[in-house]
Image (cartoon, rainbow, N blue to C red):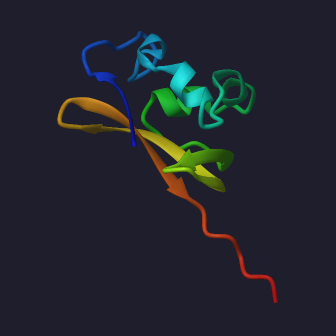
Amino acid sequence: MLKIKKMNTISKNTKINESDVNWEDLEGIGISREELERNGDLECLLNGEKVSVIALHLILLGIEIVMDATLQIVEDNNFQMLEICGIKPERQE
């Protein structure tokens, strides 16, 4: 999970203020503000709802990971964190 910022700012229309999100860090794992907006997921994310499935490209401990996942900003101990839920691929028979 990526920490967003301490919960203390709420915008007029969403639970989470867009300026509280570190978009540069999210770009590093393949999450673009522009793409979320284009797909209609930006408002969902900023309201703490799960977004539709997106493709991510992560490098964790030197291991390259490409996966489909849903995203959701959740609260934990007064911090907002990005929860990434991987989608299990369907089996090909």
Would you say 29 lies left or right of 78 here? Answer: right
Question: Residue 16, relative to residue 72: is it above or below?
Answer: above
Would you say 89 lies left or right of 20 here? Answer: right
Total numbered labels placed on residues in the image? 0
Q: Which residue is depicted at the point 71% across and 75% down?
A: 90
Q: Which residue is depicted at the point 56% across and 20% down?
A: 24
Image quadrant where residue 15 sits: top left
x then y, percent, for residue 6: 26, 21
Would you say 18 lies left or right of 9 here? Answer: right
x then y, percent, for residue 65: 63, 55
Furthest-front residue in this view: 62
Work out which quarter of the rendered image holds the C terminus and state it. Answer: bottom right
Question: Residue 35, relative to residue 13: is it above or below?
Answer: below
Q: Which residue is depicted at the point 42% across and 10% down?
A: 12
Would you say 17 lies left or right of 44 here? Answer: left
Furthest-left residue in this view: 77
Image quadrant where residue 23 sits: top right
**Is residue 64 or residue 18 the one in the foreground?**
64
**Is residue 12 or residue 70 the one in the foreground?**
70
**Is residue 51 or residue 59 the one in the foreground?**
59
Work out which quarter of the rendered image holds the N terminus and state it. Answer: top left
x then y, percent, for residue 92: 80, 83
Image quadrant where residue 41 sits: top right
Q: Which residue is depicted at the point 62% across and 27% down?
A: 27
x then y, percent, for residue 75: 28, 37
Furthest-bottom residue in this view: 93
